[in-house]
């Protein structure tokens, strides 16, 4: 039984909460690099772990991530003027650089000592893989920047996108760590008993804890060919990596995938999606990029223009088509990730896990909760947060493949488990 | 003086509140039969007494009314697949029948004992008069299904509809039990002193308590012809029945009417409207059905398509026409029931009755509050809720007519008080 | 340091709060006269200091400002019928005159003593300068009606308008009392170093307390010509008056201006704007009226039709144009007052002043807070509220002009400080 108290610990992310303090020990996505396309471009609003911030790119291309409100009279810096190596508040012209230093204080007499005292809250950032990463925690515990294989892959071999989701991050993370539901929610062809996940709808799970979180292996019998095995990783604090399916038995290009579910606040989440090619010879193709944008129900084509919100959303029941649900797909909803959103947002902003009834396929979900709660306790005790050192996650690689009868998945996956990048 | 404490008792309807527990002792409308038009049709969301539910019609045509969220991981069953005698959750394929029994648990090994333990909350339902009635209370106090004359009338002789109202049920119920306001709010022809309710705007009320609630008789002097007498019934917990007026002195077909104001939650109500013909020779005509849909401001023509919400609503001040209000009708608002909504919703979601100043025409309203509060107290004491046995309401008949000078209304109404159906 | 406790005192305006009780000692705008254009016109909703009211103009042209809900069963009087010297509730026909007296009680027998007891809450009003002023406080402390120079100016020489603002009144008042920001936020021509407020962006402030609040003088060096001096007044409880700038050095007609920021409730404000000509020979011209409506971002042309809400508002980021912000104006937002709204509403509904860092140009703001808090304390002690007697504000005149080097502003302004009207 998962208690209501543990549920509260798990879902609240503001400063001062157990999860909020834990998450502030890791680098995490604040926005896409493309949201700040050039030096001195327009500032963007960022809400992260319940904090209102503004991101801007200065004249030298450096990123600032600062408090949303000017230190002076708390005017909104979103309307600020991004000019000459700093963001100037339009109310009274106070100007701050990317580190939050006040570089001009025109309402005070020249040389006023006040300028030294005025500081805007600013967080360190780093750009990697088209994402602006931020660190919101104490200076003394700041780890090295994130260093996943996908963040090292060259631009030609990687794709990232972002989608807004109107529920707590944990509902989304649990959906991402749950392999069993893909046989149902994502069944795109009713009656197709040959599809790998339809051949066996009750996969066996093995979960193994690691220093970065855990990996788990799901195994489905596929008949005479052997087993379909998927290797997932749960990477602290809220990342999932998984094999891409697209290369399986279809002579297609290989692709590895994953998501980060970054809490905007307790009831909203930004989902960062990534896909990358592990093969230097095979960059991510135009068709793959097209598929990312158009086929999964989370790309640019699926967004209300000018936003990261889905056109298919709670206000229109995700445009579910009950006739299609009867005759073609299991859900009647278009787009794999939109299907996930329908379930996750449909649970309400924060689900009460004390009301659940879990089964054997929920092992990976149970493990993720336990690991997160233990990590919170560690930080509360003054111990380091697990999995912050890039050494723990530098060599992680997800994968999936058909494993011949009698073979061991690890041997069978072989060199495919070694990072290319 | 009505206290704030009594007001709270009267208006809160969730499980565990005095009114919530009382209302759970009666059968009440959950949705229209037409919302579930055929076997295996799309499920519909039902919110009733503050509980989120899903209704569906299975392959055999039986109705299920179950918890809105799957017992497993609380995924929304609204998106579920209604197939082969059960509703299957699209998340992991758990399947439930109309009684909430788990009939398939595909994520567990075949024969798992877990299937027996998993149960979805489900409420008994019965279909009558085009309405799906539900019982949300304890099994041991479940009464026989509702059995009003209008629920026994054949389809050809009865009409039902439903409208959404954005305020507490009691504001609506009180409007329905209040005869005095029809001389003002529903005055559709300014200066027409011949209209029955305009001839006497201060009706005398006699309220008589009964085992199902009360009946009351309102009497208006209409001059030499005698008195215009209306017989209303307040039927526990939130039903009104009244004579139809249309037959009065106009050689028209007779018609009896009423409403049930069913709490969605504390601040929202579904209004079920009914009309029926007591004369086997005279079915409800096409014109009458047209009038129901188009003339009263509560029918299909008045709804925002795809919803039960009025087009004329608070967001547009019910399209009040101040010129019409000056010259033609008292309210300037089109549609009798829309006029009621303007007043009832305009009071705010929950009115504070401790601020009122009641007069002699409010006797019926005062009585309804007292009866409801007493019934709550009875249930709190472990006594049976009054008026649950269909024997108490089987023979109720509303009526209205002109009563000649000197005559007694009961004698004058005569055989018209005896149920036909 | 401004404490959170003082902030709470400053911003809450409901009956019973310190600011709410203070504000109820003054006459204040309830609506524009043009909102009630003729006898027996449609009633209008008024929300003032957190109270829901209805204003109407009776058959004799007198204004009523009464409770929004009928004394009987609390039906909304907004839908009432304004007829024959009174507002009649459409629910049961109870009728009230502008003083709240019940003048007809048709649901009771003729001559019922109840009619005497029924009273609708009603507040005294007075019309001046196109504004309906109301007094919401105790009868015994009611002062003489407001008597500012601009309320005495003839219609030909005065202009008033109203705009809705979605934040606490104090954020708006502080913006109005702050001269420093006009060098930044309202810089309409980047690089124009000749504009008076651009020549010196760090004005010196002298604040002098008065019996009506304070006046303050801001001085900017403009080089050889001398100083640009502006005389502002803060008139209790929430009015500002200032010189018009339009007459400065441009051979244009003189104009004096100001605003009242009237709390709708804690999080919303109605801004009343006024401008008037002090010169009997020079009425407010058609061009000036045009400018009021079209150029400042607060006039009829800027409102969503049928409302007092700006088209440029938080939902569309005030249509900020980042290219214009880079090249033409400091804010990229059109309309001086819309620029103010972007900052003031952008702070959130209620700003937390304990987080500020104030400087030397904030002296006028600090003084306004202190004066308001002291006035609240006075009223709490049973002392009279300062500045309620029209004698204190009858002779106030704002002004601005270039003062020659070495000259004293008071001498230089000379007879321009004497009221014409």
Image (tube, coloured by chain):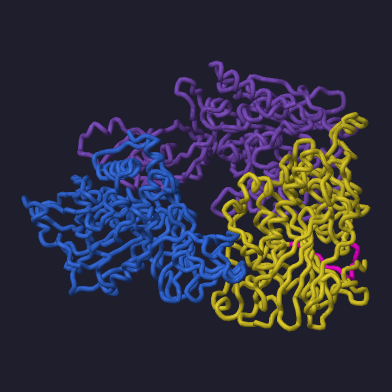
Chain colours: A blue, B purple, C yellow
Q: Is residue C251 above or below residue A294?
A: below
Residue A326 at x, y percent in the picture: 35, 52
**Apparent side of residue A406 relative to residue C325 in the rendered image (left or right):** left
Quarter in which the C terminus of chain B is drawn: top right
Q: Is residue A4 visible?
A: yes
A281 sits to left or right of A55: left
For this rendering, which residue is in front, C227 or A200? C227
Residue C259 percent coordinates (x, y): 77, 62
User: Would you place residue A219 above or below residue B202 in this image?
Assistant: below
Up-down relation of residue C47 to residue A252 (above or below): above
Tell me which residue sits at (67%, 35%) in the image.
B256
Camera-nearest residue between B165 and C151: C151
Q: Which sits in the foreground, C356 or B219?
A: C356
Give above or below for C408 relative to A75. Answer: below
Magenta stretch bounds:
C151-162
Query: What x and y, as percent, mark residue C219?
Result: 73, 71
Q: Residue at x 51, y 75 (%)?
A: A83
């Amino acid at each position: 039984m998962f208690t209501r108290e543990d549920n509260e610990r798990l879902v609240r992310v503001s400063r001062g909460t157990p999860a909020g303090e834990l998450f502030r020990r890791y680098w995490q996505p604040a926005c896409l690099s493309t949201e700040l396309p050039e030096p001195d471009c327009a500032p963007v609003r960022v809400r992260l772990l319940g904090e209102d911030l503004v991101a801007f790119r200065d004249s030298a291309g450096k990123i600032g991530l600062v408090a949303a409100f000017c230190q002076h009279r708390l005017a909104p810096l979103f309307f600020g003027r991004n000019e000459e190596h700093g963001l100037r508040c339009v109310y009274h012209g106070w100007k701050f650089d990317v580190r939050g230093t006040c570089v001009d204080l025109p309402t005070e007499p020249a040389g006023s000592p006040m300028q030294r005292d005025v500081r805007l809250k600013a967080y360190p950032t780093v750009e990697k893989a088209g994402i602006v990463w931020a660190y919101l925690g104490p200076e003394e515990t700041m780890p090295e920047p994130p260093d996943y294989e996908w963040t090292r892959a060259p631009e030609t071999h990687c794709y990232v996108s972002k989608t807004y989701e109107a529920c707590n991050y944990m509902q989304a993370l649990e959906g991402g760590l749950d392999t069993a539901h893909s046989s149902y929610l994502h069944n795109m062809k009713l009656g197709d008993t040959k599809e790998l996940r339809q051949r066996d709808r009750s996969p066996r799970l093995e979960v193994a804890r690691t220093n970065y979180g855990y990996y788990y292996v799901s195994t489905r019998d596929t008949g005479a060919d052997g087993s379909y095995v998927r290797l997932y990783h749960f990477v602290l604090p809220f990342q999932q990596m998984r094999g891409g399916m697209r290369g399986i038995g279809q002579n297609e290009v290989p692709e590895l995938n994953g998501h980060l579910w970054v809490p905007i606040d307790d009831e909203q989440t930004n989902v960062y999606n990534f896909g990358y090619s592990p093969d230097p010879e095979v960059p991510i193709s135009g068709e793959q990029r097209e598929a990312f944008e158009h086929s999964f129900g989370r790309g640019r084509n699926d967004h209300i223009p000018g936003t990261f919100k889905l056109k298919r959303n709670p206000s229109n029941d995700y445009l579910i088509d009950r006739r299609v649900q009867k005759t073609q797909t299991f859900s009647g909803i278009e787009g794999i990730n939109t299907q996930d959103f329908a379930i996750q947002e449909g649970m309400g902003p924060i689900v009460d896990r004390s009301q659940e009834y879990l089964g054997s396929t929920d092992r990976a979900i149970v493990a993720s909760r336990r690991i997160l709660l233990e990590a919170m306790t560690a930080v509360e005790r003054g111990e380091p947060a697990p999995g912050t050192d890039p050494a723990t996650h530098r060599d992680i690689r997800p994968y999936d493949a058909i494993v011949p009868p009698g073979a061991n998945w690890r041997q069978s996956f072989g060199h495919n488990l070694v990072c290319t990048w």
